[in-house]
Amino acid sequence: MRINRNTFAILGIIMAATLTVPFNLSAATNGFVVPLFRGSANSQSGYWETFSVPYGSPGNLPDQPGATTTAVLTQTNSNAFLTGSGNIYNLSTSSFTLTNSTPFTLGTVVLQTRTIGSELDYNSVVLIYADGSGTHSLAPLFRYELNRAAGNGYSVSSLWQWDLTGLGVSSYGIEFNASGPSMSFDSMTLDTANQFSAAFPAQPFGLKATPANLARWMYPFNGNPASRPTASVFGSLGSTPDFDSRDAQYLLGWSTTNRVPAGQGADNYLIRRARVTLTIASGNQYTYTGTLRDYRSYFPTNDPRYLPATNTSSPVELFGAGFRGGYAATNYPQDGPWGVVPNVYYTNRVAYAAGFDTNGALVDVSNNVGDDGTNEITSPFEIAPFAVGQSTNVAEGQLMPVGSPLTFDLNLADPLIYGYVQSGLNDGNLSFMVGSLLGASFSGPPNYPNFYTIFSSIASSNQFPLLDIEGEIVRTDVDSDGDGLPDDWENFYFGSLINGATNDVDGDGLNNFAEYHAGTSPTSSADALRLLSIERTANVAELHFAPAPGHQYSVHSSDDLLNWQTVTNPALFNSSAWLEKTGTNLFYPSPVYAGWRDTNAPSQRRFYRIEVR
C-alpha cells in the first residue's frame, strides 16, 4: 500500500504477513498467559472460571483444578448477581478486592482478568500491603491487553504484574473497579512467586533505580580503577598541553539481561523513557547549571569564532560510550586500561565520550572544541549530548550540596540516540560516559562535581549511579486480533488493542499500519514520515525529513511525476538547528532531521519522495 498525500509525497512500502500467536501464550478460551514461572518452587497459582458468590462474604476461591493458592475474590457492591454462566454481573458499578497470603516472601504477582460489556477502570488496579511504616498502595509495573473481541461491548483480557522484590511482603490485597455499570466479570487467574520473573517472553520491561555494574573513573592518573568510591568530571581548557578538553570522564555500564531479553533485534525495542541518576559526593563545590553552552563559548577569547558564554559554569553531560583497542561495552572490565598507548594522554582513550556526527557515526567527542591551539583539532564541531544533567534541588547558579541527585533524561526524540539505546538493549549492555567542559580549578577549593560510585562505603544504594528505563519488545508474530499490527506495538502506544490498522489516531494522514512500518508514533502528529522542507541553491536541492530509529530510506526523483529515478542507499546526513547553528532556535535539544542533497538538480522543477524500506 502506498500513501500519496501531495506532490512531495512520503511513501511507505507496507507488506502484511500472516501473524500467529505462539501456542504457549493461550490458556483455555480467555486469552490468558501461562506465566513462565507457574509450577516452579515457591510459587502459587489459581484459576477462577465460574463464580459462586456475587457479593460479600465468603467470597470466591479458585474453582478450577490444580489451584495452589487460597486467595479470595470478593465483590462488594450488593447490586451484583450471578449469570447462568457463572459470571458476576452488576447493573451498577462493581468493586472488587482480592486478598491473599503466601508462605513465602513475594517477589512477583501476576493478575489476569477477563470482562464482558463495560470494561474495568484500568487505572484503579492497585496492590495494597502493610508494613511497620503503614499501609502502601503499589501501582503495577504495567497493564498488558492480551485479547479484545467485539460483541456486547468488548470482551477484554488483561494482565497486570507487580514487582515486590525486597519489600518483605507475604500478605496483600488487590483492589479494582469497573469503569461503569453493566460489566460482566468473566474469569481471572492469579500467579505469585518468591522471586521476580517475567510472566511471558519479551513482556514490557522496566528497570527501576538499578545500580550500575560498571563505574570507572576515566582519568589518566586514576590509581585505583577497580574500586574508587567517587568519580569527578571536569575539563582542561586553556594553556595545559596534552590533555583532552573533557579531561576527567566517568564510565557507567549496566547489564540489562536480567530484566530485558537481549537479542530480539534492535528495531524491536520500543523505549518509553530512559534516565540516569548520579548523586553528588562532595558538596558545595559545583555551581549548578542545566543549560548546555554553545561550543564556541569555550574557544580562546582571541579566536574570531569565540562567543561569550551566557553562564559562567558548565553543565554535566551524558554521552554514549565509544571504545577502541579491541574493547567494547560488552567486554570492558572495571579495571580496564585507560589508554591504548601507555603514558599518552591526548586522543588515546580506550573508552571515551561518544556522540553522533552529521553522518550518523559515533565519534570521540573528548576534544571536540580543541584546546588553546596546542591540541586544537583542525575543525572543532558542535555536538549534541544524550542528556544534560538536571537538578530539582537547587536553582541555576547555586552550589549543589552533598547528596543532591543529578538526573539525565535521554533525548529519545533524537533517532540516533534512540537507536543507541535500542542497540545496547539488544546487546544486553547499556554504557554511557559522563563528562563536562567545566575548567577544573586545582589551585583553590575544587569547583567540579564529584559523584558516588558503586564502591562508596558511605553512600546508600539509591545514591549509586542508577538507571531507570521502561519499554516494550515487539514480537512481530504475536497479533491476536489479526489486524497486521503486533500486539506489543499496540499496547506500547495505545495501552490496548482497540485501534485497528486503518485508524489514524493522531490525525496526521498516516494510518496505524503506515506508522508501524515507518517507525513513527501513531499518537503524535508531529512524528510522521514526511518531507519537512526542500531548499534550492544553484543546481543543488536539499531535502529534509524526519527519520525513524534504525530505518533505511530510498530517495525517488521525477521531472514529470511519471518516470522516477531511485537512489536505494542515499548518502543521508543528520542534523538539527543546534548542530548547524542555523535558524532562530539554537537551544538544545532542537528537532533532529535527516537530509539528502541532489547535486544535479535541473533548473526546472523536480519532484521528490522518500520511501522507507
Image: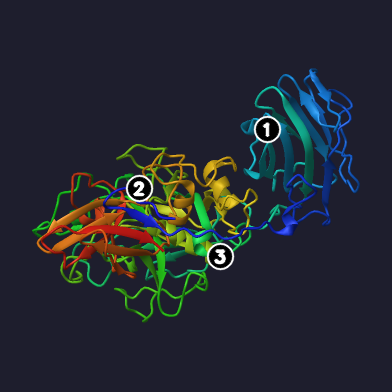
x, y percent for residue 450: 41, 54
Provide the residue designation for mark 3: 428
* 369 relative to 426 in the view: left or right: left
To which residue does mark 2 refer?
A: 285
Relative image position of residue 325 (x, y in whole percent)? 41, 79
Q: Which residue is found at the position 83% from the left and 23% from the top?
A: 81
Task: Give me the residue at 57% from left, 56% from top.
Answer: 474
Q: Nearer the viewer, residue 382 or 448?
A: 382
- Are discs 3 and 2 less than 8 Å apart at CB? no
> What residue is rendered at 83% in x and 53% in y?
42
In the image, which is nearer the foreground, mark 1 or mark 2?
1
Tell me how far mark 1 sits from mark 2, CA to CA: 38 Å
How packed mark 3 is, by other alpha carbons closer than 10 Å (few <14, some 14-19, many 20 or more), is: many
Q: Is residue 205 visible?
A: no
**Left or right of 130, for residue 141:** left
Instruction: State left or right for residue 218 relative to residue 299.
Output: right
Mark closer to the chain start, 3 or 2: 2
Task: Please state which amino acid type lies under the numbered disc 2.
Answer: Gln
**Count of picture labels:** 3
- Which of labels 3 and 1 is toward the front? 3
Residue type for callout 3: Gly
Q: Residues within 10 Å of mark 2 (few under 14, many from 20)?
A: some
Residue at image mark 1:
136
Q: Residues within 10 Å of mark 1 (few under 14, many from 20)?
A: few
Tell me which residue sits at (89%, 39%) in the image.
63
